[in-house]
Image: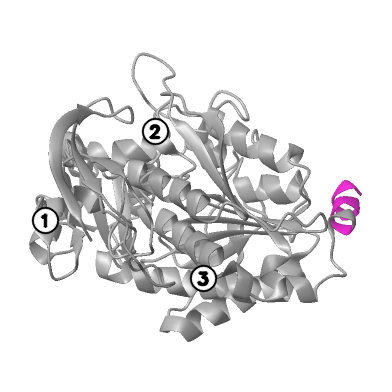
Amino acid sequence: MNILRMTSKHHCNFCREQMVRFCFISEECNSDGRREGVRVPIILVKVARRDVRYQIWDVKCLKDGQRTFLKNLDSKGAITINRDDKGRTEVMVNGSRVMQVKNLLRSREIEYEVLTNDIFSTQYAMGMLPKRVRSPDPKRNRIQLPIGNSRVLDWTDFYPLPTIYNFLDELEKTFPSTCTVSIIGKTVEGLDIKLLKISNSNANNTGVWLDAATHAREWIGTSVVTFIANYIARKFSTLPEYITNKDWYFLPVVNPDGFQYSHLHDRMWRKNRACYGRTVTGVDLNRNFGYCWENTGAESAAIDPYSINYRGPSAFSEPETTAIKDIILYSGTPFKVFLTYHACSEVIAFPWCNTSDPCPDYVNLLEGGTTMAKAMYETNGRMYKVGNFKDIMYHACGTSIDWSYGTAHIPFSYLVELRSKQDRFLLPKGEILDCCKEALNGVIALMEFVDRKKCLNCTIITKALRQ
């Protein structure tokens, strides 16, 4: 690859902060995502600033009510529970709240031990986060840049928003007959919400929806969605009919504002950047969809603007969720599959999220989810649990899969929680490619399964739901 040179500093519209400009020329790459022949004339990159530090604590919950107290702190966003096992709980504490959390634990006579003072420094030392390297790496023939900024996506790193959007644009330029990129809305802070559609324009196609980064800190979902999009775009002409007879919709970053903020300021930011009050508190976009939005039930914290699960002032109050709703309901495509990727519980969940009652097509959804899980297990030996969201996760209101199934009547609606139970949201970059490959195989298996279930259609689902 020819590197022109590093040129001037520049101010980027994505974050309105100083960036460094690099210029590149294209190179050839293979279908697995390595140097994929993408022409990238200019990429703007920024050295990551992590304004918020996090500590890891080992907490001993030995008395009645102590674990419940910790879960309440988790729902408020004061801590994040990483592991909970036999009286010992590993939690992540926001550095700005260390003294507050210490006082709260002491008031409840809860013992704790600080395991790591700064998790990001520890992960840099272990090589789990990308280093700040600005010079070319001749061995790999690509640029190593901060926080995963790269000339191409090779899925061995995490990438910021400008690089993700540039990747979508380059797919459209490379495959104009099948790939179309559109801006389906603007975020609270004015960023584009970009969607990629891959289709042969056959009028009989059904629709498949894939999205990720509804929660900003769950970067692995974006890696998976871009990896699958790349595979389908580049191999489209050779793929089986159960892949090519569908219109594919890829939304790799549902929450651009939050995603950008998690790269530049607070790695563990979850919500969007909406402001309801004097400060930015954000809305949990996976509580803002209009199906059972008002039914908070056990998730009472969803009505609190300072909760990490805040549902917003009304259903579809946020531009990000409204954009998804409008595309799915008004695009004219009869969607048959809805896949939303999250992290990090390693489950494949389907409706309902707000009740344990089985949905009208419980058996088919269980069978389809099991088909996905089997293909994923056969890829890397990673076991994904399958079931009703409420049964295998927790109670949640206003979720995207409840809306896609219950309102949009998409018969195969799944929320896939990707890796990793062990590392939570800080998945080591060495696992990214394996996770992407197992997710791709899961999708391929599901598409074949769906085409075998031609007797199942939106009309049947609609009738069952309206009875």
- Horizontally, residue 157 falls left or right of residue 6, namely right
Q: CA distance from mark 2 to mark 1?
A: 29 Å
Q: Residue at image x 19%, y 65%?
A: 141
**Viewed as shown, does residue 392 lie left or right of 467?**
left
Vertical comparison of 265 with 356: above or below? above
Q: Residues within 10 Å of mark 1 (few under 14, many from 20)?
A: some
Mark closer to the observer (2, 1): 2
Please state if 220 lies on the left or on the right of 99 as rendered: right
Q: In the rendered image, which quarter is residue 459 located in? A: bottom right
Image position of 270 with respect to 192: above or below: below
Whole-percent x, y for residue 134 in the image = 10, 50
Residue 434, magenta (yes or no): no
- Give the residue type at disc 2: Asp
| Tag 3 and tag 2, C-beta contact below 8 Å | no
**Which element carries disc 3, helix, strand or loop?**
helix
Residue 150 vs residue 458, the one in the foreground: 150
| Prevailing SS of the magenta stretch | helix
Q: Earlier in the sequence, mark 1 or mark 3?
A: 1
Q: Is residue 462 magenta?
A: yes
Residue 213 appears in view: no
Q: Amino acid at mark 1?
A: Thr
For the record, the magenta segment spans: 460-467
Q: Secondary structure at mark 2?
A: helix
Q: Which residue is mark 3?
A: 440
Residue that badge 1 annotates:
116
| Mark carried by residue 257 | 2
Quadrant that contains the N terminus: bottom left
Q: Quadrant of residue 344?
A: bottom left
The mark closer to the camera, 1 or 3, is: 3
The residues tagged by marks 1 and 3 sit, at their Cα atoms, a distance apart of: 35 Å
State the separation of the CA atoms marked 3 and 2.
27 Å
